Image (tube, grey):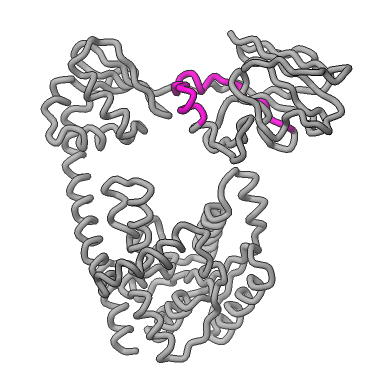
Amino acid sequence: MLSAQKQLQEFIKSNALFKPTDKILLAVSGGKDSVAMVHLFRSLGFSFGIAHCNFNLRGQETIRDQEFVRSLAKALKTDFHLKSFDTQKFAEKNKISTQMAARDLRYAYFEEIRKGFDYKKIAVAQHQNDAMETVLLNLIRGTGIAGLHGIKADRNNIIRPMLCFTADDILKLVKENDWAFVEDSSNASNKYIRNKIRMDIIPEMEKINPSLAKTFDHHLKYFSDLEAFLNSEVAKIKADILIKNDRGYQIERKAIQNLKPQKLLLYEVLKDFSFNETSITDLINALNGIPGKQFFSDTHHIILDRENIIIHKIENKHLSDLAVFESDLTFQFDNYRFKQNKLTAFPSSFTSNENTIFVDQSLLVYPLKLRFWQQGDVFKPFGMKGVKKISDFFINQKVNVKQKASIPILINGDGKIIWVCGLRGDDRFKVRSNTKKIIIFEVEKP
């Protein structure tokens, strides 16, 4: 116990996480990691309160967790903050996964409590194994050097004091002190990628290196220092070669050709403009070609000039959403003209193209809405089983950023996307064998 206390105390001090007199908000799920954090903070005499989130995703188990944490706070005579969320509804409304929804809700609530009750920092109980899982997850998905430092001990008012312990350290500590905790049943499911890494991949790696978590912790500190050094050098390069002009920025071709290593440094210089590695490779390959070639990111546009690359911000349209009512036979949005017609009889066959869709009228909730594409939009392309981000669909259709900012999206009254106008309808609204009434939407492109 004393060695664990000393280990935690030294970690907090060496990383300047907070002062001994600061009041800290502890995020407590009821699992062994957060319970160990509570007891260690208590034994060290720190001032703290406890916050718990009920995401209502695991039935009665969430009530059990909530009441356990409430009882823990009461036994320790410390402040208790609780919030219950309709996480599923939030995820559907924002078109994100339930895991991402829970994360966003959790941190927004913790920050609200931190400000409202004058807590200095928010402490979460992630440990060395969590940091290792994060790195492996980043490597699987694809990452730059920023994905290799794992989890920062202090970032944006969130501190992670338990990073000085491994999962085994915490389990041993809990058993030795007979601290009660609750188990989250979802941790035993391998349907989540992180759980697969924890349950299947890491045990195989530990057969080769039993001290894997400690080894990772050593290397993560090295990568963190390496990232800090790279950022410092890139800041100097940007100050030297990135020249501001009336419409944005420019970089001399010669300056790019002198960069070594060229791809890494140019990516770091341009990543604030949302250009990915593929775009950087294409840009480098075009440097010795004829002027005029263009490159697009989600936010910016590069033109390859004779002596420079010119970087401009893409100006998004600010056209108000258009409400479409059932009685509207024709309507216009931006430079697109639309027609809406009800079929009086069920046709024997359908002749459609990208500018026409047939929709099951019973599924429509009026008024419909026309607007431009937004980040996070998802739909189920006609003929597909799963959902797809419209941004990914645009990439597959070779639609550049400038074009996609001008493509109207037809949206049902319940929020579901009916049509990426002029490209593809949503499979959920297609005409089926039991459809009784049909509406045809047509678009005339500018």
369 on left or right of 347: left
Residue 145, given in percent of the width and then of the height, sits at 26, 48
- Number of numbered tags placed on the structure image: 0
Residue 331 position (above or below residue 130): above
Report whether residue 431 is seen: yes
- Taking depth in this image into account, of 116 and 90 the one nearest to the observer is 90
Give the quarter of the image for residue 297. Answer: top left
Residue beneath the point at 80% across and 31% down: 433
Q: Quadrant of the N terminus?
A: bottom left
The question of residue 376 being in magenta is answered with no
Residue 369, given in percent of the width and then of the height, sits at 70, 27
Residue 437, given in percent of the width and then of the height, sits at 85, 26
Residue 160 position (above or below residue 39): above
- Taking depth in this image into account, of 9 and 437 the one nearest to the observer is 437
122 on left or right of 439: left
Residue beneath the point at 21% across and 13% down: 289
Residue 367 position (above or below residue 56): above
Magenta residues (range):
393-412
Residue sitting at the far front = 348
Residue 307, given in percent of the width and then of the height, sits at 18, 14
Residue beneath the point at 47% across and 27% down: 396
Give the quarter of the image for residue 338. Answer: top right
Report whether residue 12 is seen: no
Q: Quadrant of the C terminus?
A: top right
